[in-house]
């Protein structure tokens, strides 16, 4: 008999929503005819024909796609896209507003600061060796303190000198307008080459201690073609080192850079021989590549400055042809430009 109670409850609910339920029928008809506002009893809302999942899917399909925003935006979902559509990075704005003189100063300033940046980068790559020196001075044994941590200091000094040579040879910061990601790859590749050199020296020492033939390895700085040919002619295999395509191209460029001794003055040749004294054959080769890298970096800067002067002369010539010669153009013309 539960359905009877349900039907009665439904009737009571429908009656409770009708405010005219207690009025006389004649009075109710009069009010319906004379009242300016026609009253309609509330009806229950129809049951939804679609499920919530289908409604969400339909809403997602009909919603417009979110507008594209730059990667620097804090709202990748497309909010404030009308504000970000004109966004430009600060570096791009600064480069666009720089004068020609400022660009030239950037080239020269970057070349002058290159030596200091190479020193700081070499210290970053030798941070573990430097930490060993600090630990030795702070908590080393009596023998280490009596020798002033000589072994640790020698290890750190060799790491620092080798890292600077590799960075110079690979052309670290040799171009001021190069993306910073390239210089980061050069830094990592220089550290990889240094540890490859240590692995080769360790393999030679272990072979000598065991009385085995001394293994031969290709040069530390070599092209991938030379590596392929040497691996096919030798029985030993060099330590594997996975390098990216850009690091490989940079290393190949460093291999091609050589010192043309016949074009150097006798005094410079004598200075080079003094620098090469006391170095192992491997270290001598790396030092030669480092000097060649310094010469190549200087030539790149000279080409960049030459291109800058060529652009200036071209722009000056165009202004003269159009009759828009500036005061600077006239003054430069007095001095033969």
Image (cartoon, rainbow, N blue to C red):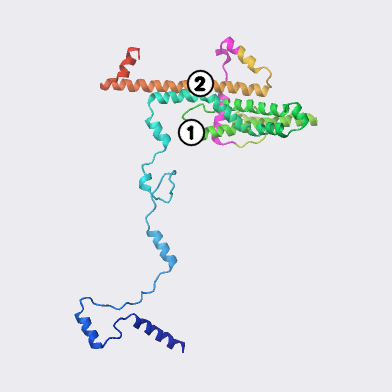
Residue numbers of the magenta segment: 243-269
In the image: residue 162, left or right of residue 144: left
Residue in the picture at 39% in, 74% down: 47
Residue at label 2?
298
In the displayed structure, 337 sits above or below 138; it is: above
Identify which residue, 54 or 75, lies in the foreground: 75
Q: Give residue 60's position: percent from left, percent from top.
A: 41, 59
Q: Residue furthest left?
A: 34
Residue 249 colored magenta?
yes
Is 268 one of the magenta-colored residues?
yes
What type of secondary structure mainly makes up the magenta span?
helix
Residue 224: x, y in percent?
A: 59, 31
Residue 144 point in image, percent of width and height? 75, 29
Residue in the picture at 27% in, 86% down: 23
Q: Secondary structure at mark 2?
A: helix
What residue is shown with label 1? 179
Q: CA distance from mark 1 to mark 2?
A: 19 Å
Is 200 drawn above or below residue 44 in the view shown? above
Q: Residue furthest bottom?
A: 1
Query: Which of 121/321 is in front?
Result: 121
Dividing the picture into quadrants, the one containing residue 261 is top right
Which circle's residue, 1 or 2, is located before the other in the chain?
1
Mark 1 vs 2: CB contact within 8 A: no
Q: Residue furthest top?
A: 266
10 shown above or below 150: below
110 or 183, nearer to the observer: 110
How crowded pointer 1 is (Cα within 10 Å; few <14, some 14-19, many 20+) is rated as few
How many dots with numbers? 2
Is residue 77 at all visible to an observer of this figure? Answer: yes
Q: Residue at x 19, y 80 (%)?
A: 34
Which SS class for mark 1? loop
């Amino acid at each position: 008999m539960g359905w009877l109670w349900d039907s009665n409850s439904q009737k009571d609910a429908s009656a409770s929503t009708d405010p005219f339920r207690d009025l006389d029928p004649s009075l109710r008809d009069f009010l319906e005819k004379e009242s300016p506002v026609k009253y309609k009893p509330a009806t229950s809302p129809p049951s939804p024909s679609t499920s919530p999942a289908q409604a969400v899917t339909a809403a997602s399909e009909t919603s417009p796609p979110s507008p594209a925003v730059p990667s620097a935006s804090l709202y990748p979902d497309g909010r404030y896209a009308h504000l970000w559509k004109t966004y430009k990075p600060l570096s791009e704005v600064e480069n666009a507003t720089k004068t020609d003189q400022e660009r030239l100063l950037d080239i020269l300033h970057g070349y002058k600061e290159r030596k200091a940046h190479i020193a700081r980068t070499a210290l970053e790559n030798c941070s573990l060796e430097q930490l060993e020196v600090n630990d030795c001075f702070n908590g080393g044994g009596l023998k280490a303190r009596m020798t002033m941590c000589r072994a640790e200091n020698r290890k750190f000094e060799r790491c620092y000198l080798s890292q600077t040579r590799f960075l110079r040879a690979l052309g670290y910061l040799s171009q001021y307008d190069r993306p910073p990601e390239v210089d980061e790859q050069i830094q990592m590749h220089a550290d990889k080459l240094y540890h490859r050199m240590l692995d080769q020296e360790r393999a030679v020492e272990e072979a000598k201690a065991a009385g085995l033939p001394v293994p031969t390895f290709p040069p530390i700085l070599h092209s991938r073609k030379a590596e392929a040919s040497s691996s096919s002619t030798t029985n030993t295999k060099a330590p594997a080192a996975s390098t990216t395509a850009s690091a490989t191209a940079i290393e190949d460029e460093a291999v091609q850079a050589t010192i043309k001794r016949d074009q150097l003055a006798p005094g410079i040749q004598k200075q080079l021989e003094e620098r090469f004294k006391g170095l192992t054959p491997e270290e001598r080769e790396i030092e030669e590549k480092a000097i060649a890298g310094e010469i190549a970096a200087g030539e790149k800067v000279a080409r960049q400055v030459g291109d800058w002067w060529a652009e200036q002369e071209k722009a000056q010539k165009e202004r003269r042809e159009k009759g828009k010669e500036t005061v600077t153009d006239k003054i430069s013309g007095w001095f033969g430009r």
